[in-house]
Image (cartoon, rainbow, N blue to C red):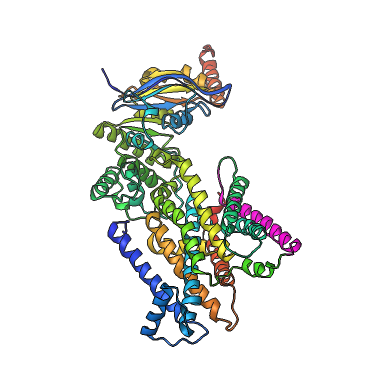
Amino acid sequence: MALVTRSRLFSILGLFLLALIFSILFALFFGPARINFNFFEMTRQFIALLRSEPLSGDGAIVFRVRLPRALLAVLVGGGLALAGASFQALLRNPLADPYILGVSGGSAFAAIIGMIFSSSFSFGAVPIFAFLGALAAIFLAIAAARTSGKLPVITLLLAGVVVNAFFAALVMFLLSVSSSRHLPSAIYWMMGQISSRSYSAIGLTALYYLPALLVLLALGRDFNLFALGEEPAGQLGVNVERSKLLVSIFASLLTAVAVSVSGLIGFVGLMVPHIIRMAFGPDHRLLLPASFLFGGIFLLLCDLVARVIIAPAELPVGVITAILGGPFFIWLLHRSREQFSR
Amino acid sequence: MKFKTLEVRGLSFSFEPGKPVLSQLTFALETGEMLGVIGPNGSGKSTLIRVLANALAPDSGQILVKEMAIQKFSRRELARKIAVIPQQSQIDFPFRVLEVVLMGRAPYLKRFELESKRDLEIARAALASTDGLELENRFIDEISGGEKQRVILARALAQEPEILLADEPTTYLDLHHQTKFMSLLSELRRQKNISILFSTHDLNLASLFADRILVLDRGQVAGLGKPEEVLEADIISKIYGIRLKAVPRILSKKPLLVPELDSEMTALKNYATKSEDGSQGQADQ
């Protein structure tokens, strides 16, 4: 049996990190535009980028368009996967996902309000708005689903559907009444799309991520004990209420930031932790960091497909993840039907 | 004189004000003792265990763990003293048996610390002592209810506790596993000198395995003592609201209580009347 030991943790995460780096390199040199790959030329252009000097030709495509987009895909995918794994642990429910629970929808609604107020489609304060929307959505879903102190899977899924529908309606309302000139891009953004952002926006995203990553990864063993139930976890020394609050806040933060930069990308938080769990077991001390890394790889590859499949046009990556995620969800639901009637 | 591992003084608890679930309980769990808690539905057995496990805060009264107030322990310190076995465990992710037992080591580990070789040895030893070592690689949700309860006991033992609280641990087990589980508890408490408090609906299981029995009736102590002292048919009959008959076991003299049904009584009376008609006796007894 494979228990989580230091050597196993480091070797698996090391492999994922390696795979992630290769995926990013692959994404740099793969796309509709043909790139003349010349190692010395690329190195020179990379150094120019670091010195904020102007780039030329292929270098500009690789380092101004593809690299920021790849980094953003990695951050968004990793964040959504880690948020999904955390929500699953918190709710003791393998079907939880920020998108399914309505957290993404709440973020999107609040983010659009933020965009209208900040009167530009820029980054700025949008994640803060999105974060408040995410918190409202998760507490709404949990409050709606709670029946006599418990959170049955089936009512939680239903509550998520309703919260989603509610926020989707609010979003439609805003888009209908607002005359902002940014709205056409907002509609495309809603479909879930990774775009090339500035490096400062990526840096800001990473900065928002940092506290969430630190806190959630520190809760790995608590998450394992949660699987026994809340009271047993408390009797093993976990401060259950504090952990629950921390997870709700920081998993919502990850979701909100991801939604702010890329709109509604669904099912990553459902599929990625599940695949990791099937491959390496449910121990969250490995599951959480592995989900983050694999989530990054997964969304990067999905985005690659979105970029080239109907080139020169592009597909929103949310379309790809939903096409993969829908059947995956149904398969999961079908596989564990009897478990959900309790 | 015996040492008191857990002492309860004037303990009261209510979920809603004015409706006490436990009122003024005073008793002690002695070192290495097995104390059975019995009482009808709603008498407060499960609540008592949750209060003792510090999952619910009492309204008034004191709980002393090794002569120190329970509030003075941190969660983790308390988890090294007291382990709890629930009626039934639902584990939602596909953990393996050994992983579940290792969770019992959590109160000894720092935040980012992984289990050491020693933790693994302790977990394996705990699993071996509950006769479950051959299960270690199985998925927790694929083993039987009896096996699962033994694994949960092993997890509790991995905590190396001095006190074990078990809330109706045999409710979902069949007769064979009930007896086996209780024998296991009894043996462990002798080997490791653990003090065990268990609640049960099965009066006879309590009679067989408990050193002393605490009878709860509507949140109050209605009796406390050795099985043969406490399990008086009249007292217990009144508490449970049915007629019970005590049948002492031949060797140990520990009482077994069996319900007497009205239909049975009528049949018995009829039978007595008939046979006495023949011998001109009196049917009244």
Q: Is residue A58 left or right of residue B18?
A: left
Residue A153 highlighted magenta (yes or no):
yes
Q: Is residue A150 left or right of residue B30?
A: right
**Magenta region, mostly helix, strand or loop?**
helix
x and y percentages locating residue B192 in the rendered image: 25, 34
Number of numbered callouts drawn: 0
A115 lies above or below B215: below
Question: Could you tell me which residue is drawn at 40 percent across and 64 percent down?
Answer: A279
x and y percentages locating residue B251 in the rendered image: 30, 24
x and y percentages locating residue B187 in the rendered image: 28, 35
Question: Could you tell me which residue is drawn at 37 percent across and 67 percent down?
Answer: A17
Please tell me in which quadrant of the rendered image residue B162 appears. Answer: top left
Q: Is residue B285 visible?
A: yes
Magenta stretch bounds: A150-179
Question: Could you tell me which residue is drawn at 27 percent across and 20 percent down?
Answer: B2
Taking depth in this image into account, of A34 and B84 the one nearest to the observer is A34
Position of the N terminus of chain B by quadrant? top left
x and y percentages locating residue B76 in the rendered image: 36, 38
Residue A64 highlighted magenta (yes or no):
no
Please tell me in which quadrant of the rendered image residue A282 appears. Answer: bottom left
